[in-house]
Image: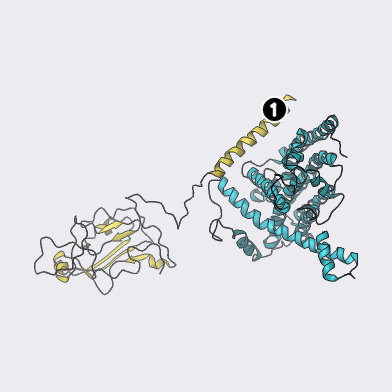
Chain colours: A cyan, B yellow
Amino acid sequence: MVIVTDVYQKILGAGASPQVLLVLGGLTMALVMALVMAACAIVFTWMERKVAGFMQSRYGPMRVGHWHGVAQPVADMLKILQKEDIIPAEADKFFFRVAPLIIFLGSLLAWAAIPFAPGFVAADLDLGLFYIFAVSGLAVIGILMAGWASNNKWALYGAARGAAQIVSYEIPIALAAIPVVMYTGSLNMNDIVHAQQGGVAGWFLLRNPFLFLAFLIYFICSIAEVNRTPFDLPETESELVAGYHTEYTGMRFAFFFLAEYANLFLVSCIATAVFLGGWQNPVPGVNVAPGLVFVVKATVLVFLQMWMRWTLPRLRVDQLMYVCWKVMIPLSLVCVVGAGIWMMVLGQLAH
Amino acid sequence: MAQYFADIFHTVSSVLQGMGITLKHFVRKPVTLQYPDERWVLPERFRGFVHNNIIRCNACLGCAKACPVSCIYIETEGKGKDRYMTRWAVDFNKCIWCGFCVDPCPTNAISMSHDYDHSLYDRRRLVYEYVPPDKPVPCHREKRLEMGYFVEEKSAGEGAEQPKPRAKPAPDPAPAAPPAPAPESPPAGADRKGEDQ
């Protein structure tokens, strides 16, 4: 954000007060992050359809846009903008309208603390990691609003299950990130990335077997956080019975989808920053733009999530809860304790 | 307790196994045929749209009688040597592509082509007329030779001779490629490939 405020300072001259610069910088970065979210939706919906296609021995979109259907998301976007906006007669109109915005907000806020490149963070918070986990919980409010305001009992069931899932899986996610904080000594995302210098060997993933386990737990639980298969019962209930976004049409529905694909990339970005070295170059000699390194690493994780989606069957809601409370939480507690002991024994305490 | 860890191990290993299978599929060439650009090579006996080589047809009505859904419409006028066929049409709204019409034909005029993808905007254009309304086709062989149509030898190949009108039927009229008298291709005639008009 410093870069942005510097630019504004040059535009406005020396007389601009720091508060104005801050506000302008903040607004610009929010706009940039919203554009990043839209770009995610475009790129990753295409990627999802192609990956799904090839894994099912077929091609996916091929005709729209001449090369393997690259303009397909644009066509979909144009189509969805033309759809009729239906609000059920007995629905709670205010909450019905507001719910997609809150879900979108929960995603947008978390983008503020992601370090894309050295110096390129929207908000250099000292509480960065903690802030991200905290605002991810806003989506729960939006989901419950959507399910309730739809005036549809099946939507309410789906929303209740979705809320339970998200709230439950936040615990192992936070616990799995604690060993990293123990190593770094700080919750600041920039510090976490800086602490992973030295190519691949510096990644937190590989420094400690308990951290490897922590990465796996983090990754799996973050898939559950964003409601992706195999944990997507709240939203595929819409294919089976009804889910919390059944009654939504057109652009409102598109907001849910935008938030889903943005979340997909968001959790991959967080995992990259925290466990895979963020924008640190994996190969020390080669000179590559750090932003590109970051995006490539996050995209590999996105591919991993898509790969899991098109391989695994969906978990039933009781299986989902069992996995969270009886497998993920104990294992993440083991990670925390084990990582601590490992660090103490090997003298790697954070400085 | 041991069951708990066995379950976890089993879960993880089966997930990895499944992901290996999908990865294998991911890197293979997909089995899809990209339709308008690539098409199947059809077997020789493939039953596509019915095609009538009208200059061989002698209006014996064999195909019309054999058709299970009566989709072949033939109208003739006159008798004997002056018999003319004024209409020979196939109604593809009804045709079931069974191929029964091909067997009874004594002159091998009717056959099933390898076309399968004609598409149109109007159902009425699916009735394919093979005889132009102003030029009825003579049915009798001698009449054809007199009029300059000529009858292809049943077993001969293609040639490029001009029509040779004669007073008496020649023992071996020269076989040739479809001539000018063959109807200017009827609106939805033989060898187009799926083009709308």
Q: According to the image, label 1 marks what residue?
A: B6
Residue found 81% across the figure and 64% down from its top = A27
Residue B4: x and y, percent?
73, 28
Give the quarter of the image for residue A314: top right
Can residue A174 be seen here? yes
Please tell me whether residue A219 is drawn above or below residue B41 in the rendered image.
Answer: above
* Amino acid under disc 1: Ala
The number of numbered badges drawn on the structure is 1
Q: Chain of mark 1?
A: B
Can residue A157 be seen here? no
Judge left or right: residue A22 versus residue B105: right
Name the residue nearer the viewer: B172 or A168.
Answer: B172
Please tell me whether residue B184 is drawn above or below residue B103 in the rendered image.
Answer: below
Crowding at mark 1 (Cα within 10 Å: few <14, some 14-19, many 20+): few
Judge left or right: residue B22 versus residue A92: left
Give the quarter of the image for residue A43: bottom right
Residue B119: x and y, percent?
42, 63
Residue A282: x and y, percent?
71, 44
Give the quarter of the image for residue A173: top right
